[in-house]
Image (tube, rainbow, N blue to C red):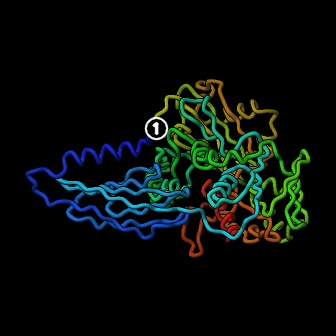
């Protein structure tokens, strides 16, 4: 069955042909023409297409890789997989059209490395590393401790009339990052997003409960980098489509790694059940919480400066609580004063055009540790309802439907924490690759500021930071 873009392109070309070259021409004949910066490239290279058509006023481009049809005069394009692609361009004016095409050959990234790689963890960083290894034609396997991929990127589709991100939720930069991460040069992602700039914003602290003036919130957003959320999908859907599905055949589930021995010529990776795997390189993408726990035994021990860097990273316990209400009695967001970490209530359905009313609680650090002192999940829910009732004169208990989801990332044995502080710089010693055999990747390896203190899209603790770090370590191995 033909791809929809190909069909659409054919229809457009046919319509242009039907109306082209009228007998009573009022415009000169079109001569379609374009040149390319290269005709052979490797996966991930950006290719420039320069239009040299004559007598045309509109253009339609099909790059042959199932990407969206482009109408720019001289676009750029990046291919994400190896192969031969026929690029077609239709040039037209009011009376005539003309089509031309060229073939572009895309190959996997060249490398002198011909060994195999073990990736520990099938979260965003691990899947991104696998995607790049797949494109480079390098043999790899992913050892995943659980029975699913995604790491701290998970979703629920049954709780409300919209999917809920149980872990990573925000796009902590401009939405164009969604295309950049998959090598697309198109400005708009295919998925619908929401610009997250809530102005009905309250604070709960030692001074009481009060609203931040709307003008102050608007000024804050004007000076702050943009954030987005997915409207009717989730981070999990994005990761699944573009990263997990192309590499899932190489994931070994329920393979919790306990030892990484890099003392020999090859690295021996041993799982909790005693199964051994041999590799030339190992990429560890486990959380900082797991590294701090020393559950994985490195032989020999990691360099002392790297251990110190791991211990220095703030990786607080955290949880997310989602509660359903029959009426919306709360604002867009409430930030609560807390000694460490954060505690924020937020409208999960913000601008999602949903019927269900879901209030979320994002808790890390001190507030999470206080919740851990309670007997069970229901006790945590009761404590939250009591706090909300104090603010809203009993409205929380009145409208609470009894439905909730509690996702505890801090006590989950394969994460042991929430996320790293985006405002802190990533310690350079964290990036050490012992013996050039063991590499580390994950959201912790991002930096919100570049060398000139400008805000970047590689926000530490974010999904994109995890993906970019996965790409970076593979580049190091290939180079």
Q: Is residue 160 left or right of residue 113?
A: left
Q: Quadrant of residue 294?
A: bottom right
Q: Nearer the viewer, residue 331 or 128?
A: 128
Residue 147 position in % (x across, y down)? 76, 39
Residue 52 position in % (x across, y down)? 29, 67
Tag 1: Cα neighbours inside 10 Å, few (<14), some, or many (≥20)? few
Residue 88 position in % (x across, y down)? 36, 56
Q: Is residue 478 left or right of residue 35?
A: right
Q: Nearer the viewer, residue 427 or 26?
A: 26
Q: Nearer the viewer, residue 295 or 351?
A: 295
Residue 253 position in % (x across, y down)? 77, 43
Total numbered labels placed on residues in the image: 1
Q: Quadrant of residue 74?
A: bottom left
Q: Is residue 232 left or right of residue 273?
A: left
Q: Which residue is mark 1?
A: 1
> Do we see residue 219 in this rendering?
no
Q: Is residue 126 left or right of residue 195?
A: right
> Do we see residue 459 in this rendering?
yes
Label 1's element?
Answer: loop
The residue located at (42%, 70%) in the rendering is: 37
Q: Identify the residue at the far left of this view.
A: 24
Query: Relative to 163, does residue 250 appear above or below in the rendering?
Result: below
The residue located at (62%, 58%) in the rendering is: 135
Position of the C terminus, as image quadrant, is bottom right
């Amino acid at each position: 069955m033909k791809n929809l873009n190909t069909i659409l392109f054919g229809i457009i070309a046919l319509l242009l042909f039907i109306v082209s070259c009228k007998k009573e021409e009022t415009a000169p004949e079109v001569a379609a023409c374009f040149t390319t910066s290269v005709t052979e490239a490797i996966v991930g290279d950006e290719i420039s297409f320069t239009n040299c058509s004559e007598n045309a006023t509109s253009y339609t481009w099909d790059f042959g890789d199932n990407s969206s049809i482009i109408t720019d005069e001289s676009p750029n394009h990046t291919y994400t997989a190896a192969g031969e692609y026929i690029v077609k361009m239709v040039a037209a004016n009011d009376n005539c059209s003309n089509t031309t095409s060229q073939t572009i050959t895309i190959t996997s990234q060249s490398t002198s490395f011909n060994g195999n790689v073990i990736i520990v963890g099938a979260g965003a960083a691990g899947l991104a590393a696998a995607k790049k290894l797949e494109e480079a034609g390098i043999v790899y396997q992913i050892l995943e401790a659980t029975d699913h991929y995604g790491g701290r990127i998970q979703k629920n589709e049954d709780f409300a009339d919209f999917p809920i991100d149980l872990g990573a939720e925000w796009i902590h930069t401009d939405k164009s990052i969604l295309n950049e991460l998959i090598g697309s040069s198109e400005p708009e992602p295919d998925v619908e997003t929401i610009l997250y700039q809530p102005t009905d914003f309250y604070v709960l602290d030692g001074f009481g409960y009060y609203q931040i003036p709307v003008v102050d919130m608007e000024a804050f957003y004007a000076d702050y980098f943009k954030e987005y959320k997915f409207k009717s999908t989730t981070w999990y859907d994005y990761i699944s489509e573009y990263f997990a599905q192309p590499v899932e055949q190489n994931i070994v589930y329920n393979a919790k790694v306990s030892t990484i021995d890099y003392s020999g010529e090859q690295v021996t990776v041993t799982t909790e059940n005693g199964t051994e795997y041999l590799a030339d390189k190992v990429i560890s993408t486990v959380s900082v919480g797991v590294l701090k726990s020393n559950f994985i035994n490195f032989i020999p021990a990691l360099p002392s400066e790297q251990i110190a860097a791991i211990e220095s990273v703030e990786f607080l316990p955290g949880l997310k609580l989602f509660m359903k209400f029959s009426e919306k009695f709360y604002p867009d967001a409430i930030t609560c004063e807390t000694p460490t970490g954060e505690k924020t209530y937020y409208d999960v359905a913000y601008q999602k055009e949903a019927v269900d009313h879901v209030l979320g609680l994002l808790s890390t650090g001190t507030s999470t540790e206080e919740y851990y002192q309670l007997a069970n999940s229901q006790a945590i829910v009761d404590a939250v309802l009591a706090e909300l009732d104090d603010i809203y004169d009993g409205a929380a208990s009145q409208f609470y439907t009894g439905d909730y989801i509690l996702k505890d990332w801090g006590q989950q044995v394969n994460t042991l924490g929430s996320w790293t502080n985006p405002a802190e710089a990533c310690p350079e010693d964290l990036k050490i690759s012992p013996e050039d055999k063991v590499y580390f990747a994950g959201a912790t390896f991002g930096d919100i500021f570049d060398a000139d203190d400008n805000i970047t899209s590689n926000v530490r603790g974010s999904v994109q930071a995890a993906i970019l770090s996965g790409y970076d370590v593979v580049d190091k191995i290939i180079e």
